[in-house]
């Protein structure tokens, strides 16, 4: 009887200690940002399975996808977010920014984490043409862990950075409404690290890589325009940041960042 009670007590104490230890440990997250060029590679082939294989190969927890089609003629009316979700066994969230070629075109998020809510925000538009947006998703770490905001976007490409800077200001205002909520921003910002656009983002965000990581063009990348940013600076720790060596599947190479959220 004494032995059984002692053993039970030791088991209970061990469980309590383990739970407390786990509760104080940082939560690790693998983030991928990938402009998939509607699944068309540099070889001219449309191949979503190839894109999915690239994603699966780095085992991300959450993915920001840009240039995603849903039901367009050019991509055989495939629901690309749903198909990529199926192929990667991740939940897919898609929001249309424009109607295009008989279907929809916009940003998507793939995730293994519980989704609390999501909303698409149209960004400032200075030109007639493509409407840009930022897809904001609130996610939760497993087992009712901490929540954080994950924002996926694709900014304007034109030489004049006026629209990009206006978009940066709007995105900053969005997250500053919840200053205590940890947040990540991932996507194709169409701006180099030393530009005014990244300086604008730096007022509210920290870049995961301080040294440039060339991600474009895919065949021989010479500049970084794809990023993962985080806030607040003191809540996240960068474990790894690198470009995936994939020169064919899209015209961009994906950027992988591994972060820890401190408790």
Image (cartoon, helix red, strand yellow):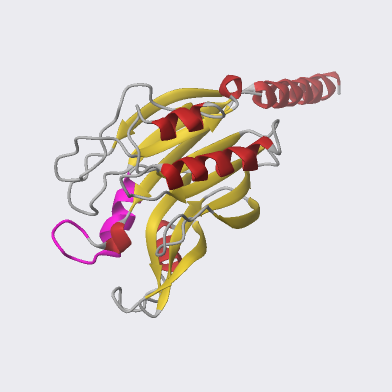
Residue 142 in view here: no
In front: 177, or 88? 177
Q: Residue at x 39, y 37 (%)?
A: 227
**Quadrant location of the N terminus in the rendered image:** top right
Q: Residue at x 32, y 49 (%)?
A: 158
With 247 as the anchor, is 5 left or right in this view?
A: right
In front: 156, or 186? 156
**Quadrant location of the C terminus in the rendered image:** top right
- Percent coordinates x, y for residue 16 in the rendering: 76, 24
The answer to which quarter of the image holds residue 187 is top left
- Percent coordinates x, y for residue 209 in the rendering: 38, 25
Q: Residue at x 63, y 39 (%)?
A: 173
User: Magenta stretch?
Assistant: 41-57
Q: Is residue 107 magenta?
A: no
In front: 46, or 143? 46
Q: Is residue 43 magenta?
A: yes
């Amino acid at each position: 009887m004494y032995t059984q009670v002692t053993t039970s007590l030791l088991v209970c104490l061990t469980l309590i200690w383990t739970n407390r230890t786990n509760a104080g440990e940082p939560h690790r997250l693998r983030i991928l940002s990938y402009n998939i060029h509607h699944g068309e590679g540099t070889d001219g082939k449309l191949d979503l399975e190839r894109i999915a294989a690239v994603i699966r190969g780095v085992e991300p927890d959450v993915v920001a996808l840009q240039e995603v089609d849903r039901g367009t003629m050019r991509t055989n009316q495939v629901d690309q977010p749903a198909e990529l979700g199926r192929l990667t066994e991740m939940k897919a969230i898609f929001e249309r920014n424009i109607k295009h070629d008989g279907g929809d075109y916009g940003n998507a998020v793939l995730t293994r984490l519980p989704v609390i809510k999501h909303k698409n925000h149209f960004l400032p538009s200075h030109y007639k043409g493509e409407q840009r947006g930022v897809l904001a998703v609130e996610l939760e770490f497993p087992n009712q862990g901490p929540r954080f905001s994950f924002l996926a976007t694709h900014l304007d490409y034109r030489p004049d950075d006026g629209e990009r800077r206006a978009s940066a200001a709007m995105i900053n205002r969005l997250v500053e409404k919840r200053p205590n909520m940890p947040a990540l921003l991932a996507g194709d910002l169409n701006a180099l690290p030393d530009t005014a656009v990244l300086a604008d983002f730096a007022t509210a965000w920290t870049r995961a890589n301080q040294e440039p990581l060339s991600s474009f063009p895919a065949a021989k990348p010479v500049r970084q325009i794809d990023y993962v940013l985080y806030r607040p600076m003191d809540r996240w720790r960068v474990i790894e940041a690198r470009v995936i060596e994939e020169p064919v599947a899209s015209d961009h190479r994906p950027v992988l960042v591994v972060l820890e959220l401190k408790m």
